[in-house]
Amino acid sequence: MAKAAKATTKAIEKKFAETAFRLGQERNDFLLPQVRELVRQEKWINLRPEYQRRLVWDDPRRSLFIESLLLNVPIPPVFLYEWELSRYEVMDGQQRLNSIVDFYDNLFPLTKLETWKELNGMRYGELPETLKRGLDRRRISATVLLLESSSGARPQANDVRKLVFERLNTGGQQLNAQELRHCLNSGDFDKLLISLSQNALFTEIWEIPAYEQNVDKHGNISKTLRENALYSRMRDCEIVLRFFAFRQRNNIRGSIRSMLDRCMEDNEHASADVLAEMREAFETRLSLAKDIFGDKVFKYEDEDGSWKLSQTLYDGVMVALDRLWDKRKFLKAARSKVSRAVHGLLKRPKAYEVIVGRPNTANAVKNRMDLLAKTIESATKQ
């Protein structure tokens, strides 16, 4: 194999000049009460637990952070991105800032502290006045990223945000694809995905702990839900997104990731009417799938006789039912035949490979949808 030609110094310097981001930085220190006010005034946005990722701190960890502030232990700076004059997006440090705001709002009591055991059980409003004043004098540093104006500013701005999100997380657990989509396209469509991922039938099917029993009135999330594999890294939201990405035939091109990215971008500013239609489409198709397949919805039988959930089978069934929506009465009437036909299809090696074998191409997605739609429709005519 021939060696790649070595780049010249001039070519390297040219690439550096063309690709370096025009990014400025400022460093500011904020008193904790200022942090609270900036959030209330919506000058610092995206501080809710749904932002970035869902690995939110529990009360013991938030308490330990507040104790560190009381002890005046050095705290790492947060990173802000100025997306509009004097308005900032929190790129890193969401959990620290969220803990400060929630503690000042008396939303959780200190717990499991070792150094300040005397404070266990106390909320901010219950602290001795001396400690309140001491906490009010504590500061948190913020590095503010400022993108200088240039031609093609919008695409470059998104490139910068994406790069910074990824690089800020290289020291820990990097953002996955859906967490990154959530960061970069956090509009009403993103909120719809989050809402639908909390649907009771959806969480039951995908074996995600029910929200009603695992999120309290203050928004605190139980350990059971927090550690669920689908919930913790927003993979539940990605599963919802896949339905919307694949139901549009003209979007099935390129890689799976590009299809999902494009769907997020195209719907970021969707109107309320469009979002309402999308909600209804998802919920009704999901309900129909449950009616037809019962406890085996989106499941296949493996070689050991165990029934396992399949994300690709979900893709195919949901889109097939969407295409056949006008025939839903016939599908319900023939539910037993439809269920047997699909599960029988999955016992054929070639069909299994297309539907469950996880081929990751646009053609594979098209073939999966077409095969399942044809099989389901044919079952109603038997």
Image (cartoon, rainbow, N blue to C red):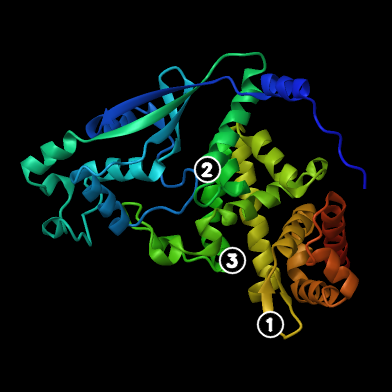
Q: Position of residue 271 (x, y in %)?
A: 60, 32
Dot 3 crowding, Cα within 10 Å, few <14, some 14–19, many 20+: some
The three-letter amino acid code for the residue at tag 2 is: Lys
The three-letter amino acid code for the residue at tag 1 is: Ser
Q: Is residue 333 left or right of residue 155?
A: right
Q: Which residue is mark 1?
A: 306
Q: Which mark is residue 370?
A: none
* Residue at 52%, 49% in the rendered image: 195
The three-letter amino acid code for the residue at tag 3 is: Trp
Chain-order first, disc 3 or disc 1: 3
Task: Give the CA separation, mark 2 to mark 1.
Answer: 35 Å
Residue farthest to the bottom?
304
Q: Which residue is mark 2?
A: 191
Chain-order first, disc 2 or disc 1: 2
262 in relation to 171, above or below = above
* Residue at 26%, 54% in the rendered image: 64
Q: Position of residue 53 (x, y in %)?
A: 49, 48
User: Which quadrant is the C terminus positioned in?
Assistant: bottom right
Task: Give the CA separation, mark 2 to mark 3.
Answer: 20 Å
Decide which of 375, 69 is in the foreground and name it. 69
Q: Which mark is residue 206?
A: 3
Q: Position of residue 306 (x, y in %)?
A: 68, 82
Asked which secondary structure carries label 3, the reply is loop
